[in-house]
Image (cartoon, rainbow, N blue to C red):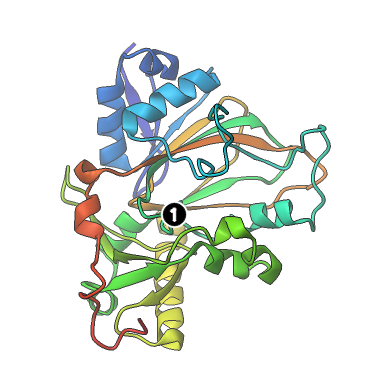
Amino acid sequence: MSISTQPLTGTFGVSVSGLDLQDVARGQGFGDLRSLFEEHSALLFRDQTVTDDDHLAIAQMFGPIEDRLADERKPGEAYEVPRVSNVRDDGAVTAADDLHTLNLKSNFLWHADSTFLPVPALTNILIGRVVTTTGGATELASTRAAWAAMPEELKTRVRGRGIWHKYSHSRAKISPELAKLPMFNKWPDQHWNSIWTNPVNGREALYIASHAYAIDGYDAPESKALLEELFAFCTQPHFTYSHQWAVGDVLIWDQRAVLHRGTPWPYDQPRTLSSICTSVTEADGLDAMRISATSTTEGSIH
């Protein structure tokens, strides 16, 4: 069967048919998959049968597996595919107000994964395992399409500047108690260029996230206001896609150029997605994003 695509929106993303992800996991068709990824930023595959082993194999083709728990894993303990879930080990669901659920709710903020890590994420491969009867959508927003359409006056205010990111910053928006947990304070603040240029096609994308808290050259209130303005522009309906999950759906998106967020669901219903992020490499434009401590714009709050 030949590969065909249907647009998810008028600005980015496609639904892909004719490409079986089990075949990709076994070494067939990754070149086509990667080309679609670079061109469209977000890919949807429906009715897929993808095991955890398949999931891991496909992710490894994109790059190194991101493992935030490596420092917590016991010697000899194997990596397990992460679950985004409200289901406890005993099968019950977590309460709406406990810290685990609050952490899930922090994912309702628009973000790119891992901008707070020394090496951020290239992609997330997200698979529907257990879905709810209502709610629980995953929404995407293209910062590449938004940047291309953004007024030059707004671009000028951020172009050429660095942006600071911290994991606990996004969690503090949900709960100060959540933000104090050690897992959200493992890594030092990260400083990235505001624009990520795709080295394959030269297209630019604004690189922001809910973890972002300061922009070089602006004080704290100015940074907050400018970030809010940028988020508001990038998340207009014209640049967004909302996906309502079915079991077997697979979403793959480019974290360099796409924001995402979850949406609420009835918390008495179980919901589980399996998620693997891969890390960017030099080939994905990492070196061009780094900013040395001595190259910040004069007047930055750092």
The front one of 236 and 204 is 204
- Identify the residue at image location x=24%, y=59%: 289
Q: Quadrant of residue 127?
A: top right
Q: Mark 1 points at which residue?
A: 112
Spot occupied by residue 227 in the image (x, y as percentages of width and height): 42, 74
- Identify the residue at image location x=40%, y=76%: 214
The front one of 2 and 193 is 193
- Identify the residue at image location x=23%, y=86%: 298
Classify the position of the C terminus by image quarter: bottom left
Q: Quadrant of residue 136?
A: top right
Spot occupied by residue 14 in the image (x, y as percentages of width and height): 38, 36
- Residue lying at the far front of the rendered structure: 75
Spot occupied by residue 195 in the image (x, y as percentages of width and height): 26, 62
Identified by mark 1, the residue type is: Ala
The image shows residue 194, relative to residue 49, as above or below, that is below
Spot occupied by residue 207 in the image (x, y as percentages of width and height): 34, 61
Q: Can residue 20 be seen in this view?
A: yes
Mark 1 closeness class: few <14, some 14–19, many ≥20 residues within 10 Å? many
